[in-house]
Image (cartoon, rainbow, N blue to C red):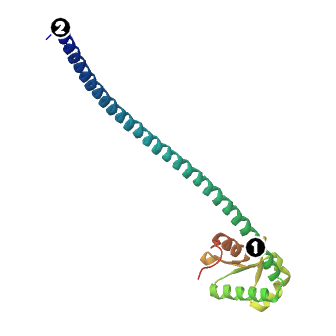
């Protein structure tokens, strides 16, 4: 082989080695870059998932807080409206009671309450009070019920009150106490009934 051929062979051999080596290095570099890229992609996706979860929880908490605040506002508004309606209702009830007190049925009720209080006392001394607004009917009530009546020093909106001192008993049939009791025990049960 001539020198020229040897040089040509050496040149081709070197070029082949360098080409193979560079291809192998390039392939290893590409594999390393692909692996690095996949790891980076997984890290970015993991961080994105974590951020999405964090933001989702944050939004849920914010929405729950807003919902709770709105529920509180609504409950307060409903409670206020209930209170207004309750007050309005009991003003109307009080007016109806005042009208009832001008009827003969009211006088019959007073006589019945007086007789029941006397029967409950069973011969024990009893003090029966009537409202100052009923003072003009005192004599008629005493004769109809067969009991001595005392006019109260303060108004209790009608009805009667009786005290049996020996038993420490108060019989309170006053409209004031009945109205207060009804107001305390009153509640709105809702709208229409479902059957």
Question: Residue at the location (78% across, 85% down)?
Answer: 106
Which element type, helix, strand or loop, lies under badge 2?
helix
Of labels 2 and 1, the one closer to you = 2
Task: Rate crowding at label 2 as few (under 14), some (14 to 19) or many (20 or more) other CA atoms within 10 Å.
Answer: few
Judge left or right: residue 14 versus residue 181.
Answer: left
58 versus 157 height, above or below: above
The mark that comes first in sequence, 2 or 1, is 2
24 versus 78 height, above or below: above
Image spot of residue 182 (x, y percent): 67, 74
**Res 143 quadrant in image:** bottom right
20 versus 89 height, above or below: above
Nearest the camera: 88 or 77? 77
54 versus 133 height, above or below: above
Question: Residue at the location (65% across, 88% down)?
Answer: 119
Task: Rate crowding at label 1 as few (under 14), some (14 to 19) or many (20 or more) other CA atoms within 10 Å.
Answer: many
Count numbered badges in the picture: 2
**Res 22 quadrant in image:** top left
Question: Residue at the location (32% across, 29% down)?
Answer: 30
Which element type, helix, strand or loop, lies under badge 1?
loop
Image spot of residue 144 (x, y percent): 78, 92
Residue occupied by mark 2? 3
User: On residue 156, which mark appears?
Assistant: 1
Judge left or right: residue 77 versus residue 88.
Answer: left
Q: Is residue 71 visible?
A: yes
Judge left or right: residue 11 versus residue 182.
Answer: left
Quarter of the N terminus within the rendering = top left
């Amino acid at each position: 082989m001539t020198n020229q051929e040897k040089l040509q062979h050496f040149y081709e051999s070197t070029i082949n080695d360098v080409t193979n080596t560079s291809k192998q290095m390039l392939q290893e570099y590409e594999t390393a870059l692909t692996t690095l890229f996949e790891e980076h992609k997984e890290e970015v996706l993991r961080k994105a998932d974590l951020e999405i979860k964090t933001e989702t929880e944050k939004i849920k908490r914010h929405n729950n807080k807003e919902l709770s605040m709105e529920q509180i506002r609504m409950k307060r508004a409903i409670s206020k409206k209930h209170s207004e309606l309750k007050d309005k209702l009991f003003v109307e009830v009080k007016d109806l009671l005042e009208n009832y007190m001008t009827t003969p049925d009211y006088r019959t009720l007073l006589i019945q309450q007086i007789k029941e209080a006397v029967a409950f006392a069973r011969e024990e001394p009893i003090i029966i009070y009537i409202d100052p607004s009923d003072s003009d009917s005192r004599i008629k009530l005493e004769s109809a019920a067969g009991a001595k009546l005392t006019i109260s020093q303060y108004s209790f909106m009608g009805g009667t009150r009786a005290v049996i001192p020996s038993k420490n008993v108060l019989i309170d049939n006053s409209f004031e106490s009945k109205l207060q009791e009804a107001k305390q025990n009153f509640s709105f049960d809702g709208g229409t009934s479902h059957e």
